[in-house]
Amino acid sequence: MNTDLYTKRLHLRKMNITDSSGLFKIWSDPDVTSFMNIDNFTDESQVQDMINLFNKLSQENRATRFTIMEQESNEIIGSCGYNSLDFENVKAEVGYDIGKGFWGKGYAPEALSALIEYAFETLNFNRIEAKVSPENFNSIKVLQKLNFTFEGTLRKSEKLKGEFIDINMYSKLKTD
């Protein structure tokens, strides 16, 4: 998936190695990574490894990650993408992170809306899923704003920072 996505304020493009310093600023912040399945990075090489992993998964059509940039400044403000692509069941799981300096400005729902539209209109997917920690109130607000449906809590279903945690499952159907 080599397509770029645009919104009113944002440019989403497939991640590449040249994004590593901009993403390092975001992924080295413990407040940003507190609900992610990574520890905050301490070295830019960790970001490069992550980008290489995302690109490998993208080549295998299993996942795709985009760098989110403000169109006006071209500044990297976060990342988003399809954590998993399931072409057999025509569904995807989405994920996103925004740098702390850009929180509360509506960038996450704006970026996510572009992913949802692309999945429904271009990929012709039927379902978008989002898994979020019950304590991640900001992420839950984003999903609620985009009219995702809360489906329930998956008890102790994933490991985060070495501990099993509950995960809330949200979904949005093409027919919603």
Image: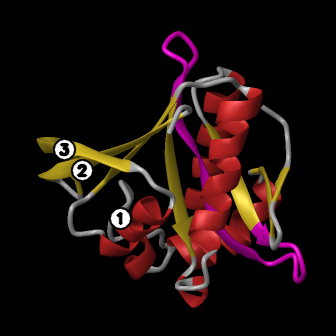
Which of pointers 3 and 2 indicates the residue nearer the eye?
3
Q: Residue at x 64, y 73 (%)?
A: 107
The numbered disc on residue 152 is 3
Magenta stretch, main secondary structure, is strand
Q: Which residue type carries mark 3?
A: Gly
The x, y position of residue 6, in whole percent, is 84, 57
| Residue farthest along the front direction in this orientation | 175
The numbered disc on residue 168 is 2
Mark sitting earlier along the chain (2/1): 1
Q: Residue at x 72, y 39 (%)?
A: 118
Mark 3 burial class by Cα count in 10 Å: few <14, some 14-19, many 20+: few
For marks 1 and 3, give the CA distance.
Answer: 13 Å
Image-based side of 163 in relation to 63, left or right: left
Mark 1 burial class by Cα count in 10 Å: few <14, some 14-19, many 20+: many
Q: Secondary structure at mark 3?
A: strand
- Above/below status of 81 relative to 138: above
Mark 1 lies on residue: 140
Residue 152 falls in image quadrant: top left
